[in-house]
Image (cartoon, rainbow, N blue to C red):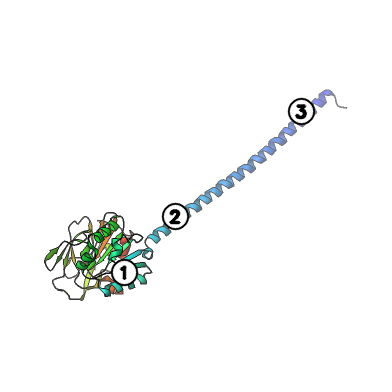
């Protein structure tokens, strides 16, 4: 039998042993929890990184998508005075680029039928007929469309129609939309109306920097040369090779964008890349710098 003192000593030893076991178990639990927490944090970091990478990839995809002209929704004007060959060439170009388009008339435009589209194309033809067909209501609807963020592409007569004023054979006319701060002057003296000819246009730096050739041959058919009234708001994309005067220009109107060309880029696949450039500008993919 053990003495009382021996029993007490034994009890102390047992208690110390139990405490030691408890401490060890707690330590094991803490280590295990820390490892789990560490793993959870690492997983969270990995998930966060993956999320960031996905976000970056999404942003890249969105940016690429924004500059994909096939996403454009385009309305093409057709009515009295439109040059049918040019209209059909525009439709062929848009189809080749898989761009959705609809042909609209003056009534559709007057009834605010441009909403749902992001670009309006006014083809070549005869600007005075556009003025008569569209009237003040149609012109107001186009201004409203562009002012609120729409794009306007004017080709030849469509470019005359957009200018502040038209100078035709030395006579000044003020029946235009006035959404581009330029004078539209034509026809070119060495190509009197109705002369057609393929002539050289030379790209300025903005076109070349965006992958266009330095020079193109484009169909001229009575189109305007542009005289900017405010050089701070007008960007020249191309000049006529024979005169150095502006052949293609970009500008802004309200929240919208305007691109005007005095030559018929639509009639030849050779000049379709220039049209691609103009559509990209109208979609907001290209921002000219002064």
The residue tagged with tag 1: helix, strand or loop?
A: helix
Evaluate whether residue 199 shows in this view: yes
Q: Quadrant of residue 68?
A: bottom left
Question: Which of disc 3 and disc 1 is earlier in sequence?
Answer: 3
Q: Residue at x 36, y 71 (%)?
A: 95
Please name the residue that numbered disc 3 is placed on: 12
Q: Is residue 123 left or right of residue 191?
A: right
Quarter containing the N terminus: top right
Q: Can you give x and y, in whole percent of width and height, for residue 239 in the image? A: 21, 66
Lower position in the chain sequence, tag 1 or tag 2: 2
* Residue 160 numbered tag: none
Residue, disc 2: 56
Measured along the vertical axis of the image, is residue 103 above or below residue 39? below
Is residue 238 among the parts visible in the rendering?
A: no
Q: Position of residue 280 (x, y in %)?
A: 33, 62
Residue at horizontal 47%, vertical 52%? 52
Q: CA distance from mark 2 to mark 3?
A: 65 Å
Discs 1, 2 touching: Cβ within 8 Å? no
**Residues under numbered marks 1 and 3 in contact, where contact means CB atoms less than 8 Å apart:** no
Quadrant of residue 282 within the rendered picture: bottom left
Q: Say whether marks 2 and 3 touch (CB < 8 Å).
A: no
Q: How many marks?
A: 3
Q: Looking at this view, is 11 or 68 the one in front?
A: 68
Residue depth check, mark 1 versus mark 2: number of the one nearer the observer: 1
Q: Which residue is mark 1?
A: 273
Q: CA distance from mark 1 to mark 2?
A: 29 Å
Q: Residues within 10 Å of mark 2 (few under 14, many from 20)?
A: few
Q: Nearer the viewer, mark 1 or mark 3?
A: 1
């Amino acid at each position: 039998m053990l003495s009382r003192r021996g029993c007490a000593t034994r009890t102390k030893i047992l208690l110390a042993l139990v405490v030691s076991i408890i401490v060890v178990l707690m330590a094991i639990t803490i280590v295990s929890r820390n490892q789990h927490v560490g793993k959870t944090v690492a997983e969270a970091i990995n998930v966060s990184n993956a999320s960031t990478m996905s976000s970056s990839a999404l942003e890249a995809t969105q940016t690429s998508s924004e500059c994909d002209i096939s996403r454009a929704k385009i309305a093409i004007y057709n009515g009295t005075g439109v040059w049918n060959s040019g209209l059909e060439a525009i439709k062929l170009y848009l189809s080749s680029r898989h761009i959705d388009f609809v042909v609209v008339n003056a009534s559709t435009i007057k009834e605010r039928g441009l909403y749902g589209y992001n670009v309006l194309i006014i083809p070549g033809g005869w600007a005075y007929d556009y003025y008569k067909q569209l009237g003040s209501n149609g012109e107001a609807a186009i201004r409203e469309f562009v002012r609120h963020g729409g794009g306007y592409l004017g080709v030849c007569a469509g470019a005359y129609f957009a200018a502040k004023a038209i100078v035709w054979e030395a006579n000044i006319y003020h029946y235009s939309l006035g959404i581009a701060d330029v004078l539209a002057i034509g026809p070119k003296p060495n190509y009197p109306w109705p002369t057609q000819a393929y002539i050289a246009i030379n790209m300025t730096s903005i076109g070349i920097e965006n992958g266009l050739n330095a020079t193109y041959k484009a169909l001229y058919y009575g189109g305007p040369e542009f005289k900017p009234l405010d050089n701070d708001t007008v960007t020249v994309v191309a000049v006529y090779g024979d005169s150095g005067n502006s052949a293609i220009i970009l500008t802004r109107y309200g929240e919208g964008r305007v691109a005007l060309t005095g030559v018929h880029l639509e009639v030849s696949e050779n000049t379709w890349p220039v049209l691609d450039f103009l559509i990209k500008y109208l979609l907001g993919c290209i921002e000219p710098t002064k």
